[in-house]
Image (tube, rainbow, N blue to C red):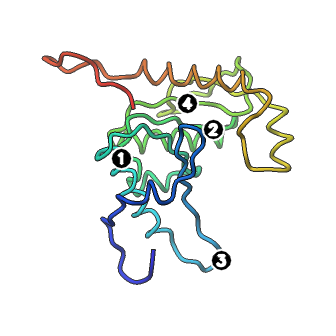
Amino acid sequence: MGKGFINLNPDVSDLPERLRVRLGHINLLVMGSVAGAGGGCACEANALLKSLLAHLLLDRDQCLLVDLEAGVEHLGRGTVAAVDGLIVTAEPSWRSLAVAAQVATMAAELGLTRQVLVLNRAPSSIVLPALAGLPPLAATIPTLSSLAERQLASPSVLGLPQHEIIDQVCGKILAALAARIAPPAEGDAQSPSPR
């Protein structure tokens, strides 16, 4: 990113092809993080990410899945302002759900009201606390023994033996997001298509 002044509107048109890793028909782009203590803020990287997301969503009309770090920083920076839907992921604990409610509330302030909640390592029978702003629960992901074993040796989650469970959960999430599409405005011929 360089040093000095931050370019808030960098040219990112070449980055998707230059930095991608192909996984079948999917392009994977990975953003780094602060490398070490005293490394400074991530302002430059976030400005780049915001421009890249806007380019992919608005200029190329790409279908994107963006996995952001936990917390509200990306919402405070408006990084996700151009997305169509938000999957808020949390653990089944009060503290994690309180952060999820804060994330959902901030996203709604950006105009991103198409949101669903997914709980990691949670039973399907879980009863959520009444927290203002918490999105509707779309799916729960049970504890996956194959994932727990894999995480000790590798950060990859691809090719897990329990992929049927993951496929079912993904289907529930996509159905829940599709159900939250706003009705068409008066005079519109059709609903907006999800990205």
Q: CA distance from mark 1 to mark 4?
A: 18 Å
Q: Are marks 3 and 2 in contact (CB under 8 Å)?
A: no
Q: Earlier in the sequence, mark 2 or mark 1?
A: 1
Badge 1 is on which residue?
81
Q: Is residue 96 left or right of residue 163?
A: left
Could you say whether the residue bearing mark 1 is in a helix, strand or loop?
Answer: loop
Could you say whether the residue bearing mark 2 is in a helix, strand or loop?
Answer: strand
Q: Position of residue 195 (x, y in %)?
A: 39, 32
Q: Position of residue 108 (x, y in %)?
A: 38, 39
Badge 4 is on which residue?
117
Residue type at the position of mark 3:
Ala
- Viewer-side residue, 130 vs 171: 171
In front of the other: label 1 or label 4? 1
Badge 2 is on which residue?
90
Q: Earlier in the sequence, mark 3 or mark 4?
A: 3
Badge 3 is on which residue?
37
Q: Reply above or below: 22 against 184.
A: below
Q: Residue at x 51, y 72 (%)?
A: 41
